[in-house]
Image: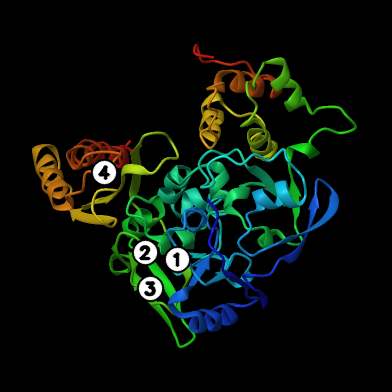
Amino acid sequence: MTALAAGTRHPVTITLNGQPRTGHAHPRTLLSDFLRHELGAHSTRVGCEHGVCGACTVRIDGVAQRACLTLAVQVDGRRVDTVEGLAREGRMTALQDAFHRHHALQCGFCTAGILMSLADWLVRVPKPTEAELRDMLSGHLCRCTGYAAIVRAVMDVTGQTTESVHV
Amino acid sequence: MKPAPFDYLRPATVADALAALAAGGDDARLIAGGQSLMPMLNMRLVTPRTLIDLSALPELRRVEVADGWLTVGAAVTQNELLARPTLATEAPLLAAALPWVGHFQTRNRGTVGGSVAHADPSAEIPLCLVALEGEVVLRSARKRRTVPASGFFIGPLTTARAADEIVEAVRFRLRKPGAAYGFREMGMRHGDFAITALAATVEADRIRLSVGGVADRPTARDWPRLEGAALDEALNAFAWDLGGDDDQHATATYRRTLVRRLGRAVIEDAQTELTP
């Protein structure tokens, strides 16, 4: 049985965007804080810290999850992907490109989380309907209310046209 | 906010977890997906001395179909169950209700057993468990016992689970031949907590309506195949019996209205499926 004492910082090793990285964390340290403060991966935003806003969404072993509802010690030995890992050799992914083209971000605070959700979800649902997409996006809050452009970008990158008159 | 300090235990077997739980007593909390517990820890609504992590236990991650039951290990995530290709034929009510549990991102981590153990009165999975006359398998270092859903949920966040027990599995009855199911929910947004959630089972000679988010626990009522004014009267009586409270999301009056209106609608959904 793994037993980690409350008052001690324990080594945590993850594969962050393909690179092995080690830091130290108290048992109570959230993955979101571990990524930002311990590993310096600042793209993962911290919003509500109770799983509602979606800004801290990362992929753990490929699966999109809330970093603020995950303890750093729970991901020891696992793969964590953040938005820093999407672009390859300075080239954005098609999804990021579509966000750029459609102005699907304003202040950008929610964007990293939304991109990480989509990076997982679009593998499972490659041709979503607009209704399915809007349902998935309900797990993210964009306080700039830029959802229309986000929907446009995703429908574009999946080779579809938007249907809603509101978009 | 951040959680208060706690010791973290990750047992390799259920037996180890049970021993740790027995040793930890009231100061220990179990965590599976943590999609309800982690917010409570972050807000310091709970401050356990020890956190026992069940999420990685292979023994709790099985799904089995046998003897008329769909048995779901407590650490199976909500999206893993939803992705089961045969779920819609095994338990159509669950297939209809699971997309309403939180959001895609929280279902990726949140577990079936965790939702049942948490026992939020508005939660969809406890509602389905009551609707499908399911059971909860509880295990302590001393013994294993099975509690029917009707006796498991006692009140808000309160269950029949003893302090030294873990929810090992949750058992839903498989689809009955000749039965049809319906599910409806009203919330502020899809994925938010349900103001009222309703599940209907319609069989040749029976209607069963189960309601979450009104009483202090998911509650079911059985009727013969009522129709018209008789069904309205039965729904009205059920709504008053459920009661409900005013809170920041809705008034008790609104919740009872939803029981009457959506109750009829969800029963009609199931009836339509039964006799197209």
Give me the chain letter of mark 3: B
Q: Contact (CB < 8 A) between labels 2 and 1? A: yes
Type of residue at label 4? Asp
Q: Calculate the distance from the C-alpha at mark 3 to the C-alpha at mark 1.
A: 13 Å
**As drawn, B142 above or below A95:** below
Lower sequence index among marks 2 and 1 = 2
**As drawn, A130 above or below A140:** above
Q: Calculate the distance from the C-alpha at mark 2 to the C-alpha at mark 3.
A: 15 Å
**As drawn, B92 above or below A72:** above
Type of residue at label 1? Val
Q: Calculate the distance from the C-alpha at mark 2 to the C-alpha at mark 4.
A: 29 Å
What residue is shown with label 4? B247
Q: Specify whether B171 is left or right of B216.
A: right
Lower sequence index among marks 2 and 4 = 2
Q: Specify whether B220 is left or right of B10.
A: left
- Would residue B35 be visible to someone looking at this image? yes
Type of residue at label 2? Gly
Q: Which mark is residue B161?
A: 3
Q: Which of B2/B192 is in front?
A: B2
User: Of helix, strand and loop, which one carries label 1?
Assistant: strand
User: Of helix, strand and loop, which one carries label 2?
Assistant: loop
